[in-house]
Image (cartoon, grey):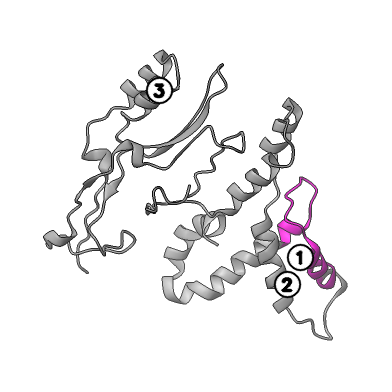
Amino acid sequence: KSPVTMWWSFVKLPITAFETVHDLQEAKNIDQSRLAASQLNAPGINIAYGDKDGNIAVWACAKLPVYPSGMNSKLIADGSNAAFDLVNFYPFNNNPHRENPACGFVYTSNDDAGPVNGKSYPGYYPPIVRAQRVLGLLSADSLMTIADMARIQNDVLSARHAAISSVLASEIKLTNQVIPEEKYALELLKSWNGNHGLNDKAPVIYYALLWKTIQYMMQDELGEADLDRKSTRLNSSHI
């Protein structure tokens, strides 16, 4: 087994988190706040901003590395080959950001904000479905009340899991020996809208089925021990 080394900007650059937080607290306007946010070297976070003058923004903060042309940041590279050395860091104004957008609001779900000046940035982003749900809820009304915001914060509907449930349920073929409880469970999976309410039965069945599906698909490749270690992340964010 060949050794693998890891590279992380957090341990390569000066720690500037304290300066960033201090200057954000002292900032008087959006320009000073943007400048304060630009100081953060690592780790990568999104900072959401709003002020009494009606300005709103969200900035992706941290030094984003410029990778050599043709390098795939998701694959292990040959560290002894200088062709894979990082070129530099992008200037802060090239980081993904939104300031006073036409839609009238900003949001972040740690999602990929999309290209900036035609350039996409590789990163460790959650699936887009959570951001799409937030965007859909925020776009439903031009004026939000405190109650509306509370409803959005407590929203537990996942269209992604509802779609997966439907696909899995469609592949299950009932036999003549099926019992009523199994038939009922299958109907719940087929009709589930993705809501995770306290008394919803479908999510309980769905996650048990999802885990068994992952287990049968991947255990022979990963092995039982590795699969157990990865199971939480596989269930929560990568399906």
**Is residue 204 located in the magenta-colored stretch of the structure?**
yes
Identified by mark 2, the residue type is Ala
Label 3: which residue? 31
- The quadrant of the image that shows the C terminus is bottom right
| Dot 2 and dot 3 residues touching (CB under 8 Å) | no
Residue holding disc 2: 169
Q: Are marks 3 and 1 in contact (CB under 8 Å)?
A: no
State the image coordinates of residue 77 (x, y, percent, origin top left).
23, 63
Quick one: label 3 or label 1, which is nearer the N terminus? 3
Counting residues from the start of the chain, the first of labels 2 and 1 encountered is 2
Quadrant for residue 192, please give it: bottom right
| Magenta-drawn stretch contains 92 | no
Label 3 environment density (alpha carbons within 10 Å; few <14, some 14–19, many ≥20): few
The residue type indicated by label 1 comes to Leu
Residue drawn 65% across the image and 48% down it: 133
Label 2 or label 3, whichever comes before in sequence order: 3
